[in-house]
């Protein structure tokens, strides 16, 4: 049975409420209609062919955001305390799948930076701390004078706002947990259908860095991309978890959490696109996959 079909067999989808509330299909469409779903940042990346220090700064902000999305915090246990064992298990599986991906993302970022510079800017790609320090220096050098830039972390205000959405996972209250479900659904759809395909487009398909998925250093992207990749599975699990919880009472909180994420990631892409890629031109072919 398909994920969506399985969700629709849950009691939350009883005939008396179905006509008055959104379905999981509506929530999915809500994500796909948001500007961040087809944001042109990755198309611009490929078109602009950013210089090495720009590549480093982009990766610093993206890597810091991605690292904030991995920990589960109190989220899975809070679902379990609410009697939602199935939903808790699905979210815990996503968290477990993501917990060791930080080093691989750093390796890929350092590898691309080396390819962009034509030299060993990151001498040891297995030294996560050293690679991330190099990325932060690029960010500090290029973005450090922007209003609100935090030199201690090297983060823009928009990056911090996007990260703050995931810090709510440390709140075990019912309302926060329901919002976290909406955030999780938005995250996994965007990751599977925009973020990872976007990275595939600008890092591999563009030919800018002569990188392929066969390169050991690109294992992070290989593991996440396509129908056999981690993000495809994560989207299915998040869709099922939200579908099982969606009813008239939970819907407003789920929608609010989804919008928290969508709006913050869109502002995040906007500032990176403007400050680092300096494009602003509409992409001819916004990066998105899937139906």
Image: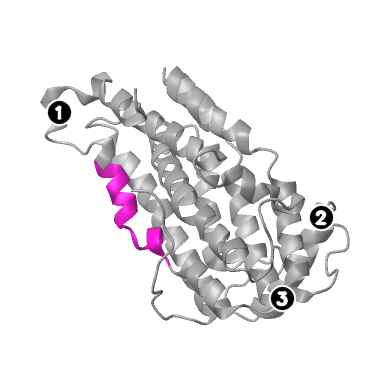
Q: Residues within 10 Å of mark 1 (few under 14, many from 20)?
A: few
Residue beneath disc 2 = 129
- Residue 246, image x, y percentages: 29, 31
Q: Residues within 10 Å of mark 3 (few under 14, many from 20)?
A: some
Q: Nearer the viewer, residue 43 or 154?
A: 43
The reply to whether dot 1 and dot 2 touch (C-beta < 8 Å) is no
Q: CA distance from mark 1 to mark 2?
A: 51 Å
Q: In what quadrant of the picture does the N terminus appear?
A: top left
Q: CA distance from mark 2 to mark 3?
A: 19 Å
> Which disc, if any, is residue 52?
3
Q: Nearer the viewer, residue 52 or 217?
A: 217
Q: Please check the rendered image and state whether residue 36 is part of the magenta-colored stretch, yes or no.
A: yes
Question: In the structure shown, which secondary structural element does the residue marked by tag 3 occupy?
Answer: helix
The mark nearer the N terminus, 2 or 3, is 3
Query: Total of numbered circles in the picture?
Result: 3
- Residue 27, image x, y percentages: 29, 43
Where does the magenta region start and end?
26-39
Question: In the structure shown, which secondary structural element does the residue marked by tag 2 occupy?
Answer: helix
- Residue 229, image x, y percentages: 55, 40
């Amino acid at each position: 049975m398909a994920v969506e079909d399985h969700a629709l067999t849950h009691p939350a989808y009883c005939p008396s409420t179905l006509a008055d509330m959104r379905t999981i299909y509506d929530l999915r469409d809500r994500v796909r209609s948001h500007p961040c779903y087809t944001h042109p940042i990755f198309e611009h990346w490929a078109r602009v062919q950013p210089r090495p220090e720009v590549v480093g700064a982009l990766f610093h902000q993206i890597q810091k955001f991605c690292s904030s999305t991995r920990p589960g915090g109190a989220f899975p246990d809070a679902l379990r305390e609410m009697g939602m064992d199935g939903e808790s298990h699905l979210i815990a599986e996503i968290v477990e799948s993501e917990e060791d991906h930080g080093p691989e993302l750093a390796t890929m970022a350092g590898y691309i930076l080396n390819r962009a510079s034509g030299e060993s800017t990151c001498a040891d790609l297995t030294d996560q701390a050293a690679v991330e320090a190099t990325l932060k220096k690029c960010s500090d050098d290029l973005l450090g004078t922007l209003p609100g830039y935090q030199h201690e972390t090297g983060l823009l205000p928009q990056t911090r706002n996007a990260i703050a959405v995931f810090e709510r996972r440390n709140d075990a209250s019912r309302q926060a947990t329901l919002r976290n479900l909406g955030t999780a659904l938005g995250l996994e759809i965007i990751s599977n259908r925009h973020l990872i395909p976007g990275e595939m487009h600008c890092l591999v398909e563009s030919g800018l860095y002569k990188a392929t998925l066969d390169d050991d250093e690109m294992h992070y992207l290989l593991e996440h991309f396509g129908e056999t990749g981690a993000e495809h599975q994560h989207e299915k699990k998040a869709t099922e978890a939200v579908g099982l919880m969606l009813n008239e009472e939970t819907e407003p909180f789920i929608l609010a959490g989804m919008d928290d994420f969508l709006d913050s990631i869109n502002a995040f892409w906007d500032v990176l696109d403007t400050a680092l890629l300096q494009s602003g031109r509409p992409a001819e072919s916004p990066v998105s996959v899937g139906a």
